[in-house]
Amino acid sequence: MHMTMNPFQKIAVAIAFSPRCEAMIAEAKLLQQTLGSALYFIHIGNQTIQEEQYLKHLLHRFNLDNNNVHVVWREGDPVESIKEFCITESIDLLVAGALEKESLLKYVLGGVSRQLSRKVKCSMLMLTEPNIHPKSFKHLVVEGTDHPKTENTITVAMELAKGFQAQTIDLIQESDLSKLALIRSDEFKENEAGEKKIELLREEDEKLEEILRCVDCGELQIQTERIEGKPGYVISKFAREKNADLLILNSPDKPMNLLDRVFPHDIEYALADLPCNLLIVHPKGKE
Amino acid sequence: MRILSHNENISLILSIGLLLIAARLFGEFFRKFKMPLVVGELIAGVVLGPSLLGTFYPKFSSLVFTSNLNASLALNGITNISIVMLLFVAGMELNLSLIRQQGKAAFSTSTFGLVVPLLMGYFSAYYFYEWYGRNSADKLVFALFMGTSMAISALPVIARTLIDLNLFRTKIGSIIITAAMFNDLIGWILFSMIMGMLKGSANHSVVLTLLYTISYAILMLTIGRFLINKSLPWAEKNFSWPGGFLSLSLGLAFLGAAFTEYIGLHAIFGAFIMGIAIGDSVHVTEKTKDIVNQFVTNIFAPLFFVSIGFKVNFIDHFDLSITLVVLLVAIVGKISGAFLGARLGGLSNKESLAIGFGMNARGAMEIILATLALQANLIGEELFVAIVIMAVLTSIMAGPMMNWLVKTKSNLDNNL
């Protein structure tokens, strides 16, 4: 079931020896099976014999004791160490478990997974409910906003959809009308404001159609939908309402900091309350 | 409670009716020449007020428009409320996330587009105080006001111009909108501080004014915004909607305005920050915002802008030299600042100049600022007239100048 064009050749999986550890390894196995990638399990903390043996045992159980699987032990700050590892090893995708919702304080200060999602320079997959019997992603919700990164995100999403044999792909165009709202009707004649808005949105539609023409979608059935509202928030809400398996978003343009949580960056609406598994796609070779 | 007499009531209602109709007629007439509605509304006031009709037909003018003292006082109250509502709507239009997420080019454009005209306005007013006519004796506050008034932009006028030129979705359009939003945010915060400083001599120190302004803004934009966002779904579920939103949002705007006025800042600041806090909620759709906007911009805004013509005689108080100085400082300051910022942000000379002319439009916001300064005796009538003329001219010239600089969208796109 390997894909024709694997967007993630090297996958790093952040593991902690928690009750979720086994499930994370099972999820990693599924990813490797589907994508045919090299796996790097990274643990930040002391390397004890007990933990080493436990990990070996798990990898053996899931048939992951092969040449394409590596185990990395590091010490230090988890976020900085993993971030550095991803850069030095040119990791394409970092996978980590994440709680759907963190307490307000923890969210503001930043748990490890969320901090990683804001800092790493590669794509990141956050799994909300890793399972020892992982299910493939059958329903994908993909960002189709008018943005230079969207084409790459859609390409990656289509490759994943083909690999996981996804049944439903919702491509969501989020219309942030806050700028369009500036052209309110007091400066226009009857219907003129509405017509102008439709005209501007049509340009977005055409761009998306062009992307879909260029991307190899194979036999995939793609539904496009336009939703008005705050970018990031509306697509998360949609993914939650539709019980999607995976939400795929563009990576932020700039490194995010505390202010992006106080005055939410689009992606923070999803991170504040993960509607499902979240994949943040970072274009390769871009800082 | 004192009530208006029968005749006063008739006078007030008649004035409002005539002002609204005149504003619409003049506004629509000038719109035919691609000018913002506000230009026509202002000219309606000039034509019907003491400048023209009052000069040639004083009896008719005073009979129809606010001849009665109490009725005119009531009308003045309505126009004051209009300013609060206009600032609330202006706040709702600001998009904090957009400002936060602005790229390098938008950041440098907004910073230089703000700082350069602000410094030019400040220094010219401080060191060449007499160039601006008879104004407040408090040189520092006056100079700060001139700096702020030079820094502000007119978002709706700019947006309209960008759409007409098919530039709204281009990089240039995006930079202009983001930079203008940032300028407005900082501009109104500065203006509130200045108004607080003006009252400061009577109430509290300058430091306390700054502390109040910053504290109110931070609290409302963090905790206040969070609470509003959390409460709106409950309100939507339990109240009729969007009617409930109209009354709740305007109610909160007035409460915010009353609070800031109480602590010694200006009422508009409370309404403006409340507008940002409410407008930023994920639960407020653009359709809902539009209802508030329609209500304010089609009823209260025209009343306010026409009433300006009744407050000042534009013919008597027109001073060519003051007007030229204001025009020069405003245009050179804004265009050079935005140009420099855009160039540093990596845009070409032509694109940067186009951005400069786009951001140069001052429009309605400048007129509100000047009106408040006039009411507070911070500026004289000559300078007020000069600022209004500057606001109108910069709004009118934005479109043709941008068009001249950036002929077609495709030319632009090639450079993006």
Image: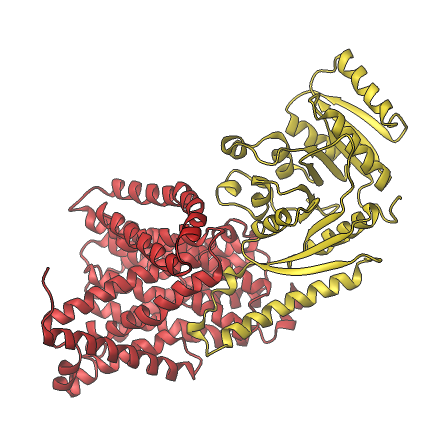
**Chain A drawing hue:** yellow
Vertical placement of residue B294 versus A176, above or below: below
- Viewer-proximal residue among B199 and B232: B232
The residue located at (47%, 63%) in the rendering is B287
Q: Nearer the viewer, residue B376 or B386?
A: B376
Q: In the figure, the red chain has which letter?
A: B
Give the answer, above or below, for where A75 lies relative to A157.
Answer: above
Q: Judge from the rendering whether residue B282 lies leftward or rightward of residue A93; answer left or right.
A: left
Which sits in the foreground, B20 or A73?
A: B20
Residue B196 appears left or right of B231? left
Q: Where residue B189 sits: x, y (%)?
A: 35, 51
Displayed quadrant of residue B216: top left
* Residue B68 coordinates in the image, percent (x, y): 11, 74
Horizontal relation, residue B161 to residue A277: left or right: left
Where the C terminus of chain B falls, by quadrant? bottom right
Q: Position of residue B132 (x, y in %)?
A: 25, 65
Total numbered labels? 0
Q: For the point 30% across and 80% down, which residue is it?
A: B21
**Residue furthest toward the top?**
A49
At which x and y percent is residue B372?
25, 61
Give above or below for A285 relative to A40: below
**Whether residue B154 is visible:** no
